[in-house]
Amino acid sequence: MRTTMLVLLALALLLAACQSMATPPPAPPTPKPPSVTPPAVLNEETVEDYFVLTSPAFADGGTIPPQYTCHGEDVSPPLRWGSPPEGTAALLLTMTDPDAQQVVGSTWIHWLLYDLPPEVRTLEGVSAAPEVAGGRQGTNSWGKIGYGGPCPPAGPAHRYIFALYALDAPLGLPVGATMEEVEAAMEGHIIATTQLVGLYP
C-alpha cells in the first residue's frame, strides 16, 4: 500500500514538472514607443523637434498682421517647422481660404509651394518669385504665380489655412501648377501633415 502511494506521488510530481516545462514564461511587457505628441507650448528649443507648423507673427487661431495681407506688403508671414518624418523626400505648402466659398462658391487658393527640399525649416517674405528655397511656386486663384495674402470682403473674419505636407517623393511639376494638378500629383504620397490657421481681418 505504501509503495503504491509513493508511486502515485512520484507520478504526480513528474506530471506537474512536465506541465511547468510545457508552459512558457510570460513575455516581458512591450516597451511603449517614445511619444511624438508635441507639448502644448512650443518654444525656440522644442519647435525644432516636431513636425509642427508655427509662426512667430501670429498664434494658431490668431489674427494675421496686416503687413502680410493685401492691405500691407502682401508677402508671406514667417513660418517655421521642425524635422519632418523619416522618408520625407519633399515638402509641399499650401494656403487656402475655405470661407471664400460663401462669396465665390469655392475655396480660394492663396499659395502653392511644392518640391521644397526636406531640409528647409523656415520661410518668410515670399511673393511672386517662380522658385523659392529650392521649391517651385504654383498658380493661385488670382491666376498669378506665388503668394497672395488675405484680402477678404467686408464682413466676418475669414480663416486662412497654411498646410504643410511631408511627401515621399517630389511632385515634379513645373512652375505655375494649379491646385488640381498638385492634388492629383500628391495623391498616395503624403507621409504627414501639419497646419496653422490664421484669421483676417
Image (spheres, rainbow, N blue to C red):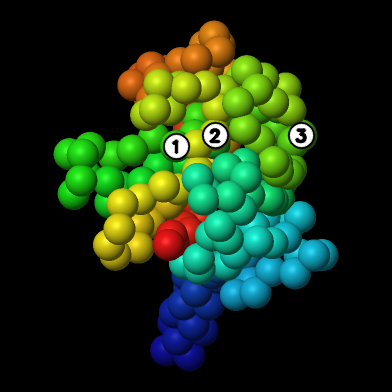
Q: Residue at x 70, y 43 (%)?
A: 124
Residue 147, label in figure: 2
> Residue at label 3?
119
Q: Which quarter of the image is occupied by the N terminus?
A: bottom left
Query: Residue shown at 52%/22% (left/top)?
Result: 145
Element under disc 2: loop
Q: How many marks?
A: 3
Q: Mark 2: which amino acid?
A: Tyr
Q: Secondary structure at mark 3?
A: loop
Q: Report the Cα–Cα distance between label 2 and label 1.
A: 6 Å
Residue 116 visible from this viewpoint? yes
Q: Which is nearer the N-term, disc 2 or disc 1?
A: 1
Residue 193 visible to the viewer? no
Rendered view: 37 above or below 101: below
| Mark toward the start of the polypeptide (3 vs 1) | 1
Query: Residue 44 or 1: which is nearer the viewer?
Result: 44
**Alpha-carbon distance for marks 3 and 1?**
24 Å
Identify the residue at image location x=65%, y=61%: 57
Residue 169 coordinates in the image, percent (x, y):
57, 20
In terms of image quadrants, where is residue 110? top left
Amino acid type indicated by mark 1: His
- Which disc is residue 110 wearing? 1
Q: Nearer the viewer, residue 187 or 94?
A: 94
- Residue at the limit of the structure toward the right, as seen here: 45
Q: Of tags 3 and 1, which is closer to the observer?
A: 1
Rendered location of residue 55, percent (x, y): 64, 58
What residue is at 39 percent from the left and 27 percent from the top? 142
Give above or below for 51 relative to 104: below
Mark 2 and 1 residues: CB-CB less than 8 Å, in contact?
yes
